[in-house]
Image: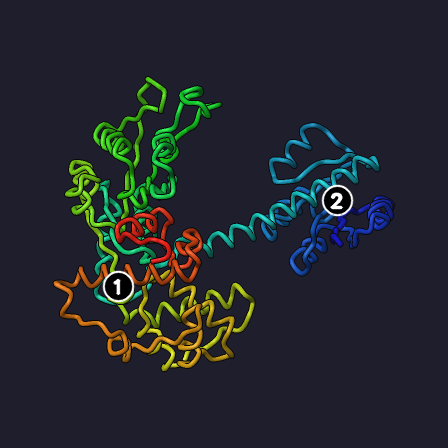
Amino acid sequence: MAKILIIDDERAIRNTLREILEYEDFEIEDVDNGVDGLDLIKRKNYDLVLCDIKMNRMDGMEVLSAGLEIRPDLPFIMISGHGTVETAVEASKKGAFDFISKPPDLNRLLITVRNALDRGSLVTETKVLKQKVSKTKTREILGESPSINKIKETIERVAPTEARVLVTGANGSGKELVARWLHEKSNRAQGPMVEVNCAAIPSELIESELFGHEKGSFTSAVKQRIGKFEQANGGTLFLDEIGDMSASAQAKVLRALQESKITRVGGEKEIDVNVRVVAATNKDLLKEIEAGNFRMDLYHRLNVIHIHVPPLVERKSDIPLLSETFCEEICNDYGMPVKKISAGAYEALKNLPWTGNIRELRNVIERLIILSDKTITEDDVKAFSNPSGSIYEPETTSKSSGLNFDEFVNFQDYKDYAEKEYIKFKLEKNNWNVSKTAEDIDIQRSHLYSKIEKFGLKRGE
């Protein structure tokens, strides 16, 4: 029920307004002077104030100004028996929601009151949403390991410049977070940051996505489309998984970087664009260049500054801090008391094979919060860290695997073998459902298809 304060030195007007508004189920309080009205505004939480302009002790315009200093978002409806256009304009300039002449028309009064209350609700809702947005603002880069501190230092140095940056690292390691901080700390922070996942867009559509298209340029082009380069004008364009971009799109991106101009698909007009490009990939682009899959000239254009984000297994000292932070965030999101993590649990978490990196760690912490008691223990980690329910025992893995490590010429051979066996196991577990397997192991579906082809995996092997 909305709470309304009436400030008017005429008892008859106060009684009339009270009778009308109480009939509409509003909660009403009234006073006969502005001084007492301001005192009530300080002490109580009103949704709306109806205030006379001509009053003893304090003028209504003074009440309006002082009231808005106390509660800037509080709607005021000013009332006067000497209503003029000049008075209404002055009231609006001072921040009043509306102006009503005496005696008030019933319908006009109720419509104005409801509109003012609706405006107040929208203002409150906007504030709440802004608070939520600020809470979900770009996450801090958590960690104090030497590699993470080096990344933070590099961001501080590079972000204020216009240098292009290539961010490399495994899936889930935090490449996008690095890109976001490069934008947040740049001179373009007030501009947009537009993200394009090059692996998620079919090769035949990537050019339209990046550069836009003109109406009728191809069968389904029923209207003009503005591409990501234009959307990011004045800001940052984040090209994620750049290693999966088609050859023709690479050529156009190279031209856009060289000339700061683009042409929409099916168009002839050159469009100036002012964007800073940050690219990211989980691939070794030098190997992709050797294989003929990536342009050398584009690589050098993108790789002005190189930031490599290490996998989680190379920064295990950061796991306690990451786990504690994730635990607090998730518990707050769930509206539950923050759970404690025992020292043994931290050690058990450090010993897990983090193939999914930071993303996987957060998922594991969420699972532990749901399935554990008030304190997350070492046994909880062993029991629940693997979705399949199996317990990871690092000290017995190499003994029970039956592998002869001398079979592998180098570390890359062993990594390929382990990756192949892991993907094969997951595919078989999911009955060769590629989409479900890609989601399960937290990689792009297109990447999984590439791995299946690379290792020659076939159903029923």
SS for callout 1? helix
Front-most of 59 and 349?
349
* Quadrant of the image containing the N terminus: bottom right
SS for callout 2? loop
Front-most of 445 and 281?
445
Q: Residue at x 44, y 58 (%)?
A: 431
Residue 411 visible? The answer is yes
* Quadrant of the image containing the C terminus: bottom left
Quarter of the image for residue 353 reads bottom left
> Residue 11, how many percent across, how many down?
85, 48
Callout 2 amino acid? Met
Which one is in front in this view, the residue at disc 2 or the one at disc 1? 1
Callout 1 amino acid? Ala
Query: What residue is pinned by disc 2?
Result: 55
- How packed mark 1 is, by other alpha carbons closer than 10 Å (few <14, some 14-19, many 20 or more), is few
Q: Residue at x 26, y 47 (%)?
A: 159
Looking at the image, tell me whether mark 2 or mark 1 is earlier in sequence order.
Answer: 2
Residue 193 visible? The answer is no
Question: Is residue 19 rendered to the left or right of residue 252?
Answer: right
Instruction: In the rendered structure, find residue 144 and report the number of the disc placed on it.
Output: none
View extreme (front): residue: 460
Q: Residue at x 37, y 54 (%)?
A: 459
Question: Is residue 134 rendered to the left or right of residue 15?
Answer: left
Q: Residue at x 76, y 49 (%)?
A: 6
View extreme (top): residue: 268
Front-most of 274 and 93?
274
Q: Is residue 429 above or below residue 217?
A: below
Instruction: In the rendered structure, find residue 418 and report the number of the disc placed on it.
Output: 1
> Residue 151, how many percent across, how many down?
24, 57
Quarter of the image for residue 269 reads top left
Question: Is residue 6 rendered to the left or right of residue 198?
Answer: right
> Residue 279, how many percent across, how many down?
27, 44
